Image (cartoon, grey):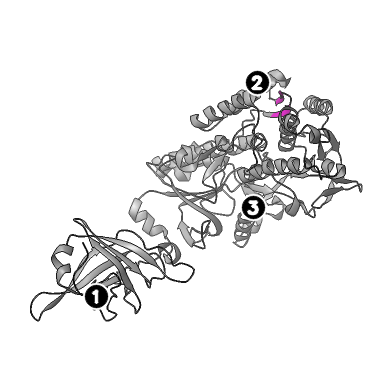
């Protein structure tokens, strides 16, 4: 019911600017001139105030209090309640309005005698921006377990985090991406054969016991054993201490200094890349289908160029051919007549890591499909509408996918610089490492104490491990087994060479899809090609998914594509 006292005598009752109320520690009084209550009501459980022109700078919890008369000449200050919600941010004119509902535990007793009313803002310290660095001593006292900090959520980091025993060690994952991606199927997702979400798994789902920070690691202090992180969702910077640091930041596409690649080409390393490619394919075909599009422009828009003849480039060319033959020709029959797929490889053969007989099979198969393959040529420059080859040939294109190689990420280069600044660091990490961290056989980074590395960003000294998902996953499992043993028996950590085997890569072979339900299998004991190998390829890709959910989703996506075709929606 409406209040019948001096506080809210009318619907436009203004709060007295001279109200007396002791705000909570760190708070400030909000009763400024012009602030007023435009409406008020009291129910059995809540006091509701419609407050206009609040003087808050941001959204913070509020409290309400009154000065009530306790007798003929006595007054007392009473804190009625705390507002449980948050006040909305100011509008474009700088004003704030809100309906504040307070629990009416003390309202019925004190409000009828109220002389004045005050609303106060309760300020708290922003931990994300001004929190002190987390130091190792504080963590050890609190948990008494070694803290393992993992950088990345790729194949190596996922395998490590999933297999670590959280009962004996704290696990912290820092990565700007909060999910794992089954990267071999990115070419399939870029054309709609498989849905994006079918091949990803949130890192918290893989290991619910971990502590995850969605941030990028920018620097590391090897002496203090602290990393500096930049939050992905804001300007927040913070430090994370570690007992053991595992670097599994992977790699990034390498442009080899080719002009125009960064600006005009698409890569295929992340889910975001596959989504951009899928959207651009539909954009090109929709634009080419306009009646006003010239024949020359239509041919350009319908030309798909792939640079790089490794497994990624070959599989994308194959998936693009299936998309063109099975789906786009039905919906864009006029444009599909001018469509062509071109693949450029700087080396002499496709799939250089495969057996020679499989390389020849892939070349013959692409020839039958009409995919134009040029080997032994380099891209000199890329513009918005064409690429220029080393022999001067200019090739117009609508979409260009760059799959020509990988290089180190920024953090890997910075870590190498930090190690080389230390005594004997230059000898431990020589310049000939080509941007990859040099490890010992136990995956420890040479020249850095308690720092390990796995995956594309590192290589064992004396070896030349391929930068593949298979290597990274095996390294993650190896390091997890080692950490689990040392955590259960700390006294044996210093004697690891006596009781723990060195890392040895077990080559299980490589698979590649080449289109029209045909695949290649480069296995240690056999070299297979054809549609039977395609069944093997699909079976392996389904069973190698990291969770039952992903296996079911990928299997259903294959069946859905077979029955209904690929989705050509543009969104």
Whether 469 is drawn above or below 91: the answer is above
Extreme-top residue of the structure: 532
Q: Residue at x 23, y 73 (%)?
A: 7
The stretch drawn in magenta includes residue 74: no
Q: Nearer the viewer, mark 2 or mark 1?
A: 1
Name the residue nearer the viewer: 486 or 242.
242
Question: Which element is circle 3 on?
Answer: loop
The residue that label 2 is drawn on is 535
Find the distance from the CA under tag 2 to the CA under tag 1.
75 Å
Examine the image and state in which quarter residue 364 appears.
top right
Q: Is residue 516 magenta?
A: yes
In the image, the segment drawn in magenta is 512-521
Question: Which SS class for mark 1?
Answer: loop
Query: In x, y percent, where is residue 235?
Result: 52, 63
Q: Of residues 421 and 557, which is closer to you in this image?
A: 557
Q: Is residue 38 left or right of residue 487?
A: left
CB under 8 Å between discs 3 and 1: no
Q: Nearer the viewer, mark 3 or mark 1?
A: 1
Q: Quadrant of the C terminus?
A: top right
Q: Closer to the N terminus: mark 3 or mark 2?
A: 3
**Residue 538 placement, left or right of 393:** left
Mark 3 or mark 2, which is nearer to you? 2
Q: Is residue 559 left or right of residue 343?
A: left
Residue indicated by mark 1:
22
Q: Residues within 10 Å of mark 2 (few under 14, many from 20)?
A: some
Residue 272 seen in the figure: yes
Quarter of image, res 156: top right
- Read off the residue under disc 3: 409
The tag earlier along the polypeptide, 2 or 1, is 1
């Amino acid at each position: 019911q409406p209040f019948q006292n001096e506080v809210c005598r009318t619907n436009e009752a203004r709060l007295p600017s001279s109200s007396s109320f002791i705000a909570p520690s760190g708070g400030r009084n909000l009763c400024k001139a012009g602030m007023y209550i435009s409406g008020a009501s009291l129910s059995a459980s809540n006091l509701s105030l419609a407050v206009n022109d609040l003087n808050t700078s941001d959204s913070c919890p509020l409290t309400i209090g009154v000065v009530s008369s306790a007798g003929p000449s006595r007054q007392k200050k009473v804190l009625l309640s705390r507002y449980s919600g948050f006040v909305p941010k100011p509008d474009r004119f700088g004003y704030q309005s809100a309906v504040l509902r307070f629990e009416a535990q003390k309202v019925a007793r004190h409000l009828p005698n109220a002389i004045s009313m005050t609303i106060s803002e309760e300020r708290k310290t922003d931990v994300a921006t001004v929190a002190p660095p987390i130091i190792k001593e504080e963590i050890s006292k609190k948990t008494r377990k070694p803290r393992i900090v993992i950088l990345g959520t790729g194949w190596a980091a996922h395998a490590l985090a999933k297999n670590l025993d959280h009962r004996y060690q704290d696990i912290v994952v820092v990565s700007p991406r909060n999910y794992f991606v089954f990267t071999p199927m990115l070419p399939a997702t870029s054309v709609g054969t498989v849905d994006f979400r079918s091949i990803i798994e949130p890192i918290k789902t893989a290991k619910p016991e971990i502590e995850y920070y969605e941030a990028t690691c920018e620097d590391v202090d090897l002496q203090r054993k602290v990393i500096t992180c930049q939050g992905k969702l804001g300007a927040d910077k913070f430090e994370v201490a570690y007992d053991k640091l595992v670097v599994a930041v992977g790699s990034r596409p390498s442009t080899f200094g080719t002009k125009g690649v960064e600006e005009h080409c698409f890569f295929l390393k992340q889910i975001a890349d596959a989504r951009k490619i899928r959207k651009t394919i539909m954009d090109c075909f929709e634009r080419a289908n306009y009646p006003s599009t010239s024949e020359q422009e239509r041919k350009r828009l319908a030309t798909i160029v792939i640079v790089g003849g490794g497994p990624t480039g070959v599989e994308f060319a194959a998936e693009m051919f299936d998309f063109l033959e099975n789906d786009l020709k039905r919906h864009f029959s006029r444009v599909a007549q001018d469509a062509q797929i071109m693949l450029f490889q700087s080396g002499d053969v496709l799939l250089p890591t495969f057996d020679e007989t499989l390389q020849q099979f892939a070349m013959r198969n692409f020839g039958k499909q009409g995919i134009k393959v040029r080997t032994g040529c380099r891209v000199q420059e890329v513009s918005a509408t064409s690429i220029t080859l080393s022999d001067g040939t200019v090739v117009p294109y609508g979409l260009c996918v760059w799959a020509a190689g990988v290089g180190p990420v920024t953090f890997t280069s910075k870590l190498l610089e930090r190690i080389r600044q230390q005594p004997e660091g230059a000898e431990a990490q020589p310049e000939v490492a080509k941007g990859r961290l040099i490890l010992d056989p136990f995956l420890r980074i040479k020249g850095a104490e308690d720092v390990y590395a796995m995956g594309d960003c590192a290589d064992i000294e004396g070896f030349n491990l391929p930068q593949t998902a298979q290597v990274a996953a095996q390294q993650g499992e190896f390091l997890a087994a080692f950490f689990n043993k040392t955590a259960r028996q700390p006294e044996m950590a210093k004697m690891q060479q006596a009781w723990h085997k060195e890392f040895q890569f077990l080559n299980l072979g490589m698979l590649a899809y080449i289109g029209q339900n045909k695949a290649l299998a480069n296995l240690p004991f056999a070299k297979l090609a054809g549609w039977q190998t395609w069944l093997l390829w699909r079976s392996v890709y389904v069973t190698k998914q990291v969770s039952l959910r992903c296996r079911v989703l990928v299997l259903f996506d294959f069946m859905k594509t077979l029955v209904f075709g690929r989705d050509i929606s543009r969104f």
